[in-house]
């Protein structure tokens, strides 16, 4: 009895150990399936999806295509109708919820049927096995591949819930026609959202993956209907007829995927933090109706001026207060290969010409100048060895010009004068603060004043909007970040609370807005052009560059800011002077489209008041001033605004000495107060370098030296310390050139001045 008990205990112990071994084996296998590395699944779940991109009003812009043009939209399982889920499960794996990746009954049945027929007539792949094959595709269909797929199916079941498996499967199932997933399939084959499909259409979709070329309802509606009918016959009490399925299949229509704003979508896709390809839905700030209007305006303008080699253009519109991009037209025709239509003119770098001047004048206001300051529009030389001699667009000199008029009429020489006074480094720093990343390594010298460095319309429009935002900088943006996956109306409060960067003082921004919307101040340069007339206050700035190769226009109201570039990407110059009025008219028409006939005006600068000033000197008007204008002056008043005009006396007009050369160019009324300023050599500039003209004998080459100011009526000229000649007003001498350095000095009464030049 004792021996039997001992044998029984040993047997029981072996049995327990065996069960423990079996349990451990299963546990190990499960842990292997659950936790072993499966990089293919990780990569698969992270691969990009087609993003549905909407405009600000919920209209489709694009559904992005992926590699090789495939569209693969994603929908959470709960957004795929239950009857669609049921239909696909019935079509591919009716025991999906009762197995763990492998359906052994189906495997046995398929093996028997295939053996009986001597060929493959039935498969036993479950949805999980099909998903494993999609995750790690393999063209070979041998036994080893099938065993691997079966193992991967078990790994999927160990790691994911049935809902997760079904969601991955339905969103990645290939349908042919560059279509993957049921959402894209419903759209591609029936031009419908998946939620709008009926049961018949869902059945037609469910059979396509079996053999896309055979069951595609677009090309083979009868085959599709027959297969769908057989599928539904397996379900109880359908009551359907083959005719009903044929009608459903016959209604299949290939969807025309929208392709709106391609340059804008590409810009969004290229951002480092872009949600495109990651988010299912993105709501942009673009307004599609305005986009179409802008595209039409640009294409018509390009067509009209095609003979002038004006072959392309770009338009950018943003909300002035928030920076939201409303329109982005990168070229006249995206598909125009001869004219490089796929190049994005909004982002390409071109010389903007005078469109850049407002930023320089704003900096000048913050450097001590005022709207009534007088700037010299006279023949001037800048630089040293490399002389820079700017000209106005009409090759005329206007003499003394008030700050307001010089900016509004876009005069070149006063702008270069300002930059020379302020300094290029200081100006470049301000431009970089304004978002001009293209100028990070710029070294354009004084030509910066006239837009001599390449920038983009994107940068210019972004910077120009600063003025109607009281000097605050906000980067432009195109995606409503809080609307990736829903259509709730967004608020800009959170965005605006991110502390916009102050670039200009509020008064500076408001003064620039006032000047650029002043029709009277603009008249000297542009007359009273109807191009700039709007039924509401608006500011404009235009520019031309590179022999009219690039013509630009900037326009803004407190509501919207518009930037327009026109020209060509080939580098050819435009034939004829088409002028910046073309892009200016587009900018004006877009503002009218957006605002109609209403719109609030620009705010008045605080701490400033309007006073009558002399139209010539900019000083406080006196009784002798023939013309006066109303101008903003600081409440505390500058020195020139405290003093009454000294340019107009009872004897006539007296110009400062610096205007002597300009005064003598024509017969003008008045006199030049040569004695009213310090003695100065006004030409050439100190440090200038000159080169012999090889076509003229060296002993005949002379340099004209001109001086102004001084307290006496006679000046004495010295060359290298030796007396050369004497001159009465105007002080002019012709000095012979000799190789090397030369010192030229002028003495007038008790004053003297000197320069040094180099001759090579």
Image (cartoon, helix red, strand yellow):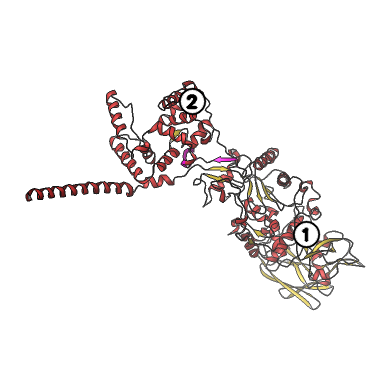
Q: Position of residue 8 (x, y in %)?
A: 12, 48
Q: Is residue 732 above or below residue 333?
A: below
Residue at position x 48%, y 28% in the image: 200
Q: Nearer the viewer, residue 702 or 92?
A: 92
Q: Residues within 10 Å of mark 1 (few under 14, many from 20)?
A: many
- Residue stretch in magenta: 58-77
Q: Secondary structure at mark 2?
A: loop
Q: Disc 1 vs disc 2: Cβ atoms closer than 8 Å?
A: no
- The residue singled out by tag 2 in the image is 219
Q: Is residue 190 left or right of residue 747?
A: left
Looking at the rendering, which quadrant does residue 445 occupy? Answer: bottom right
- The residue singled out by tag 1 in the image is 404
75 inside magenta stretch: yes
Q: CA distance from mark 1 to mark 2?
A: 69 Å
Quadrant for the C terminus, please. bottom right
Whether residue 323 is visible to the viewer of this picture, yes or no, is yes
Q: Secondary structure at mark 1?
A: helix
Q: Residues within 10 Å of mark 2 (few under 14, many from 20)?
A: some
Q: Position of residue 177 (x, y in %)?
A: 47, 32
Q: Is residue 350 left or right of residue 744?
A: left
Q: Is residue 743 above or below residue 479?
A: below
Q: Position of residue 667 (x, y in %)?
A: 87, 59
Looking at the rendering, which quadrant does residue 408 occupy? Answer: bottom right
Q: Nearer the viewer, residue 338 or 659?
A: 338
Q: Position of residue 318 (x, y in %)?
A: 65, 50
Q: Nearer the viewer, residue 175 or 259?
A: 175
The label shown at residue 449 is none
């Amino acid at each position: 009895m004792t021996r039997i008990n001992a044998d029984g205990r040993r047997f029981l112990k072996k049995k327990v150990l065996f069960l423990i071994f079996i349990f451990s084996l299963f546990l190990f296998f499960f842990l292997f399936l659950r936790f072993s590395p499966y990089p293919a699944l990780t990569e698969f779940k992270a691969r990009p999806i087609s993003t549905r991109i909407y405009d600000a009003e919920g209209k489709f812009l694009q559904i992005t295509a992926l590699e090789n043009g495939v569209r693969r939209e994603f929908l959470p399982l709960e957004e795929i109708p239950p009857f669609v889920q049921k239909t696909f499960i019935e079509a591919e794996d009716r025991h999906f919820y009762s197995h763990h990746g492998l359906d052994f009954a189906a495997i046995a049945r398929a093996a028997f049927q295939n053996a009986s027929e001597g060929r493959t007539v039935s498969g036993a792949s479950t949805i999980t096995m099909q998903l494993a094959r999609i995750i790690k595709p393999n063209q070979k269909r041998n036994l080893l591949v099938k065993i691997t797929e079966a193992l991967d199916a078990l790994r999927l079941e160990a790691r994911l819930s049935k809902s997760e498996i079904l969601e991955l499967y339905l969103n990645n199932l290939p349908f042919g026609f560059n279509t993957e997933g049921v959402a894209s399939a419903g759209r591609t084959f029936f031009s419908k959202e998946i939620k709008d499909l009926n049961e018949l259409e869902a059945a037609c979709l469910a059979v396509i993956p079996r053999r896309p070329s055979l069951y595609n309802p677009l090309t083979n509606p009868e085959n599709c209907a027959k297969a769908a009918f057989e599928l539904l016959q397996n379900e109880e009490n359908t009551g359907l007829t083959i005719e009903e399925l044929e009608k459903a299949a016959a209604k299949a229509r290939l969807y025309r995927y929208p392709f709106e704003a391609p340059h804008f979508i590409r810009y969004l896709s290229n951002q480092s933090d872009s949600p495109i390809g990651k988010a299912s839905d993105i709501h942009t700030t673009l307004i599609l109706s305005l986009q179409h209007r802008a595209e039409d305006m640009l294409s018509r303008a390009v067509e009209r001026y095609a003979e002038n080699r004006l072959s392309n253009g770009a338009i950018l519109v943003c909300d002035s207060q928030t920076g939201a991009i409303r329109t982005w037209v990168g070229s006249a025709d995206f598909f125009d290969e001869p004219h490089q239509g796929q190049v994005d003119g909004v982002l390409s770098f071109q010389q903007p010409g005078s469109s850049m001047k407002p930023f320089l004048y704003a900096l000048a206001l913050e450097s001590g100048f005022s709207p009534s300051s007088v700037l010299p529009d006279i023949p001037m030389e800048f630089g040293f060895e490399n002389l820079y001699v700017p000209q106005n667009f009409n090759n005329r000199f206007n003499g003394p010009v008030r700050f307001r008029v010089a900016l509004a009429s876009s005069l070149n020489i006063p702008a270069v004068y300002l930059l020379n006074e302020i300094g290029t480094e200081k100006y470049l720093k301000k431009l970089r603060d304004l978002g001009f990343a293209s100028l990070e390594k710029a070294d354009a010298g004084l030509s910066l004043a006239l837009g001599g460095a390449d920038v983009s319309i994107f940068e210019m429009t972004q910077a120009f909007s600063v003025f109607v935002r009281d000097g605050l900088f906000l980067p432009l943006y195109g995606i409503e970040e809080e609307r990736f996956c829903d259509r709730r109306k967004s608020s800009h409060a959170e965005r605006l609370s991110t502390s916009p960067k102050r670039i200009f003082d509020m008064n500076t921004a408001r003064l620039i807005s006032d000047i650029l919307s002043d029709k009277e101040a603009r008249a000297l340069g542009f007359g009273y052009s109807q191009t700039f007339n709007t039924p509401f206050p608006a500011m404009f700035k235009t520019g031309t560059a590179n022999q009219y190769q690039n013509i630009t226009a900037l326009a803004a109201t407190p509501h919207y800011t518009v930037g327009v570039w026109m020209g060509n990407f080939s580098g050819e110059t435009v034939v004829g002077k088409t002028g910046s009025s073309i892009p200016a008219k587009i900018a004006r028409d877009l503002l009218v489209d957006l605002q109609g006939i209403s719109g609030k005006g620009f705010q008045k600068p605080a701490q400033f008041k309007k006073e009558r000033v002399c139209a010539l000197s900019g000083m406080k008007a006196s009784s002798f001033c023939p013309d006066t204008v109303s101008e903003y002056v600081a409440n505390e008043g500058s020195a020139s605004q405290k003093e009454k005009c000294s340019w107009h006396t009872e004897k006539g007009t007296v110009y400062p000495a610096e205007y002597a050369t300009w005064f003598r160019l024509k017969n003008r009324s008045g006199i030049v107060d040569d004695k009213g300023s310090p003695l100065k050599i006004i030409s050439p500039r100190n440090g200038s370098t000159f080169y012999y003209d090889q076509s003229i004998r060296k002993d005949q080459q002379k340099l004209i030296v001109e001086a102004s100011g001084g307290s006496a009526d006679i000046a004495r000229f010295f060359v290298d310390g030796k007396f050369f000649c004497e001159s009465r007003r105007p002080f002019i001498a012709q000095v012979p050139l000799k190789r090397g350095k030369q010192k030229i000095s002028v003495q007038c009464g008790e004053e003297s001045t000197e320069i040094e030049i180099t001759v090579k």
